[in-house]
Image (tube, rainbow, N blue to C red):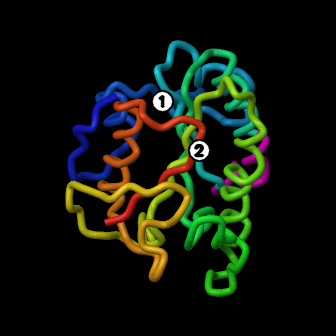
Amino acid sequence: MSSKIDDREIRPPKFERLGCRIVWGDGGEPADAYADSALKAFGLGADVVAALAPRGPLAAGFRDVHRTIARLADAAGTPLFVVGGYSSLRPAPDADRFVTDLGHIPAELHDEIRARAALVIDDLPATPATLDRVFLSPALRCGARMPGERLGRSRLGDDVAVQPEDGGAISAADYALGFVDPIEKGDHHRTQVNFGH
């Protein structure tokens, strides 16, 4: 996998040019994540497995799919890197996670936020100690809903938000670069990290 990610939108063919393998289904679309054959293909011969987001048809079975991905990655000895969410972070060491108070977040996002946070709170800690896994959370303002300026750098934190006062921001491009960095360096294991500018 390479960190040479430019400022254009990254689509699946571009991921493949970077050395990533997308599991494709019939008809040229990404494979159905609920299909056992597709899930088994995720870890076959891969150096790393990067997991999915709880949106669209995946929302209902998100945690079950990730438990299966974690089991298969562990069996293959493949590290698992999970796209995290800001609300799973804490404002200070040993403080409650932001997910415990979603009053300021639109209600239509609550299920997605809770499902993603449950991975790092409940599901990933319950995995066997042999699973090498990292949960990587962006700053609060990140992604298509809140695009940020690409700076080509980011700050790294653990499960305490880099900017807990206002949630911080990071461009999707800088989050992608930050996501690749622990994969390439291999210096984080069975933990949560977060990125912000």
Residue 102 against residue 185 in the figure, above or below: below
Q: What residue did someone put label 2 on?
A: 52
Question: Residue 107 in magenta?
Answer: no
Residue at screen point 68% across, 31% down:
69
Residue toward you, 53 or 186 = 186
Residue at screen point 68% across, 75% down:
108
Residue toward you, 74 or 58 = 74
Question: SS for tag 2?
Answer: loop
- The magenta-colored residue range is 55-64
Residue toward you, 187 or 148 = 187
Q: Residue 152: horizontal and vertical position, in percent? A: 21, 55
Residue 79 against residue 134 in the figure, above or below: above
Q: What residue did someone put label 1 on?
A: 22
Q: Amino acid at mark 2?
A: Leu
Point out the frontmost of discs 2 and 1: 2
Q: Residue 5: horizontal and vertical position, in percent? A: 25, 43
